Structure formats: C-alpha cells, structure tokens
Image (cartoon, rainbow, N blue to C red):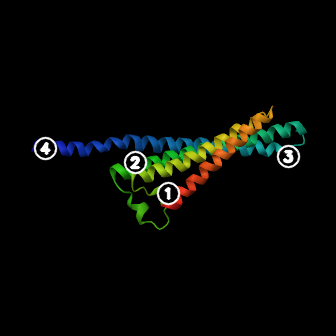
C-alpha cells in the first residue's frame, strides 16, 4: 500500500517539469515579440535610407546600424527557437508525446523529440547557430589594427567552419 502510494508520488513528481515547459514557452513568445518589434523598427528606420536629407556619412552609419540590428534580431529569433524546442522537448520527454505533432504530415521533425539525446542534438544545432551569429556581430565591430588581429579573426572563422563540418558529420552518422 505505502509502496504503491510512494511510486505514484514519484511518478507524479515529473509534473514539476511543467514549470520549465510553461516558462520556456512564455519566454520564447516574449523573445519572438521583442524580435518582431525590432524588425518593425528596423524597417521604419531603413525607410529613411533614401531621404535626400541624409549625407553619405549618415547613410554609411545607417547601413552599419542596420546590419547590426539585423544580426541582433536574428539572434533573438534563434534564442526564442531554442526556448521553444527546449519546452516542447521537455514536455515530450517527461509528460506526454504531442499527438498532433506526430499525426500531422506537416509537422517538422525538429519538434518531435524521442530521447534526451534528440533534445540535446537539436538544441546544440541552434546554439551553434547563435554562436555563429554572435561571432558575426562581434566581427562587425572589430578593429583590425595589426596582421595578428586579422589572423585571430581568420582562426575564429576556421573554428566555426570546423564546428559546422563536425556537426554535419554527426548528422550523417544518424
């Protein structure tokens, strides 16, 4: 009797994961909203690009700001995607399979999580993309004062390329 009750309590304790699921989904929605607002503001600022009142220097500055904002916007969307995949993955692993995702012919296989390794692999890919976007954002503001600075930058690009290549090799093995 006590053993059965205890096992039921242990099994029900998995429902605490719902806190992480709901928090992740709410945070993802918030980041999607923020990135969409950023996109809207970006478009309204870019509409000024053709203004005859802007000098050539102003246009160059607006272009640089626009590229930086695009990178930040993409970064926000990628982070929101990580939270979305994480929340759905936790739900599928600890609570229940999402029947609509498996039954629907239009669902993406990215959102169907069968194991903790599946969740880790999907999250790792998106985190790698975030790192690439962050490196690009960092590179936009980088000053190359010496040849060594340029060499370090090139090594960073080579490491990112190697990480992408290794990620691709890992996908081919599955």
Do the residues under discs 3 and 1 have CB atoms within 8 angstroms? Answer: no
Distance from the alpha carbon under mark 2 to that under mark 3: 48 Å
Which of 88/135 is in front? Answer: 135
The label number, if any, that marks residue 110 in the structure image? 1
Please name the residue that numbered disc 4 is placed on. 3
Q: Indicate whether 98 appears above or below 127.
A: below
Distance from the alpha carbon under mark 2 to that under mark 1: 14 Å
The quarter of the picture where residue 21 lies is: top left
Instruction: Look at 23% across and 43% down and name the residue there.
Output: 10
Label 3 element class: helix
Q: Nearer the viewer, mark 4 or mark 3?
A: 4
Which of 166/124 is in front? Answer: 166
Residue 94 shows in the view: yes
x then y, percent, for residue 133: 65, 44
Sequence-wise, which precedes: disc 1 or disc 4? 4
x then y, percent, for residue 48: 81, 43
Instruction: Look at 67% across and 41% down and name the residue there.
Output: 156
Distance from the alpha carbon under mark 3 to that under mark 1: 41 Å
Label 2 element class: helix
Q: Nearer the viewer, mark 2 or mark 3?
A: 2
Q: Among all residues in the image, which is located at the extreme top?
A: 145
Which quadrant does the N terminus fall into?
top left
Please name the residue that numbered disc 3 is placed on. 50
């Amino acid at each position: 009797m006590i053993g059965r009750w205890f096992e039921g309590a242990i099994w029900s304790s998995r429902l605490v994961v719902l806190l992480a699921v709901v928090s992740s989904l709410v945070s993802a929605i918030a980041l999607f909203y923020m990135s969409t607002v950023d996109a809207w503001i970006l478009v309204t600022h870019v509409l000024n690009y053709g203004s005859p009142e802007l000098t050539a220097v102003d246009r160059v500055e607006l272009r640089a700001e626009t590229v930086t904002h695009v990178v930040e916007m993409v970064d926000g969307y990628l982070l929101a995607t990580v939270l979305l995949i994480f929340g759905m993955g936790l739900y599928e692993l600890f609570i229940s399979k999402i029947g609509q995702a498996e039954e629907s012919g239009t669902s993406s296989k990215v959102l169907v999580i069968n194991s903790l390794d599946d969740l880790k692999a999907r999250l790792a890919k998106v985190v790698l993309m975030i790192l690439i976007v962050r490196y690009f954002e960092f590179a936009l503001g980088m000053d190359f004062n010496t040849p060594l600075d340029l060499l370090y930058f090139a090594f960073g690009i080579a490491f990112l390329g190697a990480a992408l290549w290794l990620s691709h090799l890992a996908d081919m093995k599955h």
